[in-house]
Image (cartoon, rainbow, N blue to C red):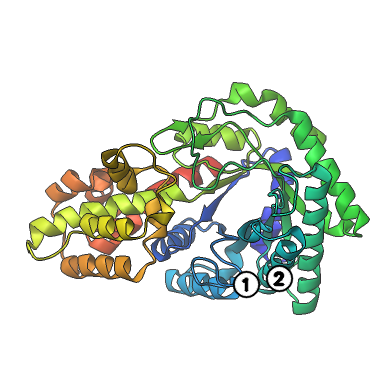
Amino acid sequence: MRAATHRFANIAARRAAGEKSGIASVCSAHPLVIEAALRHGAARRTDVLIEATCNQVNHDGGYTGMTPAGFRSFVEAHAHKAGFPIDRLILGGDHLGPNPWKHMAAAAAMKKAAAMIDAYASAGFTKMHLDTSMACADDPAVLADETIAARAAELAEIAEAAVERAGGERPVYVIGTEVPVPGGALEALDHLHVTEPGDALRTVEIHARAFSRAGLEAAFGRAVGVVVQPGVEFGNTEVVPYAPAKTTELVAVLDRMPQFVFEAHSTDYQPAEALNALVRDGFAILKVGPWLTFALREALYGLSHIADILAPDFSRESLPAAMERIMLASPENWQQYYPGTPDEQRVQRHSSFSDRIRYYWPTPEAQRATRTLLDVLSDKDIPRPLISQYLGQLDAEVAAGRVKPLAHDVLIGSITRVLDIYADATGQ
């Protein structure tokens, strides 16, 4: 087993031994985020966990157009450029299940999910979050826990067979269905509940039985994480921080299932002290995605303002104007998520914590607009006063020489600021 996967597989044992044991899961396919994460890992000499979701990357291409094998090649190419050792890379699949095809009947959707997880396992992904909690077209509105677990075991069996056929490392599994809405909540955040301790225990017990019935005891022995809701979430303008006092009973059940740690989703924008407390309490796998692309967008927009000053050209469309035009032309990725008046929606399109703008950066038009901006700035040194004015969060880093006052370095530096918060919290 590769060293990085071995360390990840032993995350619960390391925590039990008193080690500060946690890892950030980078959930993004943006090239600059991937580059920043790998450069960050190389500098700190730590493992890096990068995950793709079932909608983002699958055997049909997902919305990125990448298969699991293609995503692996994409990440490894960036690793080589960053000088990051491949043996410290962990590739994960998130929400692996029938979600992209839940509009189909369950049998057909699960057939697609099986083909997807086969592709992930064959491509060498070694961290699998099995999520079969969603109802398909002919399912009851709410699935029985036993059905969810049986479907998860069915997918694990496919993954195990794929590795047996293709060779490589046996995957490590994460189970659990109490998953916050990907990308942030759609509604008010005044009703969040922490997972009941009994529900966490029941999840493990039911999955253990389902795996055993399928003859997958060895595979279940490699399950390390349970997804639970620790009471953290973010919306368009709100962030609900972690409150340790509310999770005391939930945290206590880890003593009764020493094989596991908790995986926490939607940890974006949490204060540093909250992330530290999450890891201390056993929420050792911290998912982060929108915060990274939010930080990237902040830096890109700051650079757009700087370009208007350093190289004024009234015929050139600013990056915010270009992105507004692109998002208005294709509203399907933001419209249902951003309520309110047209003015309120306009603000949210660019500045919401849920960061729905991240779905537009891969489009050809957005890529052209970004390239135009970076070509304008090229290798220009950005004066400190403009860093202070438009990229104030990086001013101290530039002043100390840790970030060069160049456009590309500023973009990487903005993402790295967030990665540093997670690294400090997880002991990475």
Q: Quadrant of the N terminus?
A: bottom right
Q: Where on the picture, by quarter, is residue 198?
A: top right
**Can you give x and y, in whole percent of width and height, for residue 290 in the image?**
44, 49
Q: Where on the picture, by quarter, is residue 14?
A: top right
Helix, strand or loop at label 1? It is loop
Residue kind at label 2, given as amino acid type: Ala
- Where is mark 1, residue-wise? 59
Q: Which mark is residue 287?
A: none
Residue 202 located left or right of residue 91: right
Helix, strand or loop at label 2? It is helix
Q: Residue extending furthest bottom? A: 166
Give yes or no for contact between labels 2 and 1 (Cβ–Cβ under 8 Å). yes
Q: Nearer the viewer, residue 282 or 270?
A: 270
Q: Reply above or below: 163 against 224.
A: below
**Can you give x and y, in whole percent of width and height, for residue 423 in the image?**
50, 47
Q: Residue at x 69, y 48 (%)?
A: 11
- Where is mark 2, residue-wise? 115
Q: Nearer the viewer, residue 218 or 160?
A: 160
Dot 2: within a 10 Å radius of its alpha carbon, few (fewer than 14), some, or many (20 or more) residues? Answer: some
Q: Reply above or below: 221 against 87.
A: above
Residue kind at label 1, given as amino acid type: His
Q: Residue extending furthest front? A: 138
Camera sees residue 221: no
Q: Residue at x 35, y 58 (%)?
A: 412
**Can you give x and y, in whole percent of width and height, for residue 59 in the image?**
62, 72
Residue 230 located left or right of residue 144: left
In space, the residues marked 2 and 1 are separated at their CA atoms by 7 Å
Q: Residue at x 90, y 59 (%)?
A: 214
